[in-house]
Amino acid sequence: MNDLPRIGGQTPMHHRTLGNSGTVVSTYALGTMTFGAEADESASHAILDDYVAAGGNFIDTADVYGRGVSEEIIGRWLAAHPTQAEQVVVATKGRFAMGDAPNDLGTSRRHLRRALDASLRRLGVEQIDLYQMHAWDGVTPLEESLRFLDDAVRSGKIAYYGFSNVLGWQLTKAVHVARANGFTPPVTLQPQYSLLVREIESEIVPACVDASIGLLPWSPLAGGWLTGKYQRDSDPTGATRLGEDPQRGMEAWEPRNKQVGTWRILDVVQDIAKTREVSAAEVSLAWLEAQPAVTSVILGVRDTHQLAANLGAASVLLTPDEIERLNEVSAPIVSDYPYGQAGVDQRHRDIDVST
């Protein structure tokens, strides 16, 4: 992922190539899972207006966000803003069920053809810039999925494709199957990644670096945990994700509150934020933007105020010492073998170089 200078000179937004492609995207993308749910159409369009005005050009959605409503809202914004529509890069996803029939999900040619055509209609575009497989499909042969994606590129329905929520070996297999068959290769992977969720660094990040695959991290603030809005052993309340639902998904309050590491990480984040006179969210996002293989960090917001607060991270350049402090306190616990130092050193033992 090549770092590129600020484009236009109007904002501090940086840009990078989209994985191993030549398309250029801003290092902060706009995630739109809130569109049609936590943000109505008017609020969603205001978010899009402000995001593009700030120099952002990368919009991420999925067919299952609001069961198509997110794509429809984006499509109406694109139609109303033809000039901006020419400049933005639009990504969406297919894989999960949009109906109750057996073939209404998966990455089979049959399902992907219908899902892609439906996304094109809802977005009101002739081509989707980045089409992503939303998760691995253990039923459909990988060759079938990749041949469909290659056909979709050749027909002009999509420009590039990528994956989301897959393992390192799955991504590497896709890269090599595509290469062996002369298919268009994938360019991106969208995983969960943040200071609180770094487990992908064991195998997924190295797989991406090896294949020049660009990472598009989702939940970069760990569902709001890294904003500093929560206090230890104090149940969250109010209009926040955990205030409204403390047991919400993988960012649920109780499990993370019990982990000592959570609060150690937050203490360091807040200490750096205080010293720099910026927010904890800006520090957390700036750390993630600086990680190897990261192309663009996906921001999920409810309103323009949250967007402005998060985009402030584009102006924050952490020092090597600050990054090292964050790396050290948030380092995931891994076993000594095969990922620890003993596993690495074993390669150099018991070798008689004289024979």
Image: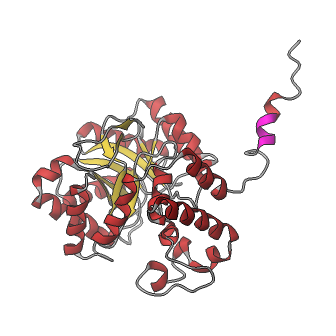
- Residue 253 visible within the image: yes
Residue at 59% across, 47% down: 321
Please state the total of marks drawn on the protein image: 0
- Verify whether residue 193 appears in magenta: no
Residue at 53% across, 78% down: 230
User: How are the colours assigned in the image?
Assistant: secondary structure
Q: Position of residue 123 (x, y in %)?
A: 21, 59
Q: Position of residue 240 (x, y in %)?
A: 43, 80
Q: Position of residue 180 (x, y in %)?
A: 48, 29
Image quarter of the N terminus = top left
Image quarter of the C terminus = top right
- Which range is magenta? 341-345
Above or below for 279 versus 86: below
Q: Position of residue 168 (x, y in %)?
A: 58, 46
Pick out the residue farthest to the top. Answer: 355
Most common secondary structure along the magenta stretch: helix
Dividing the picture into quadrants, the one containing residue 178 is top left
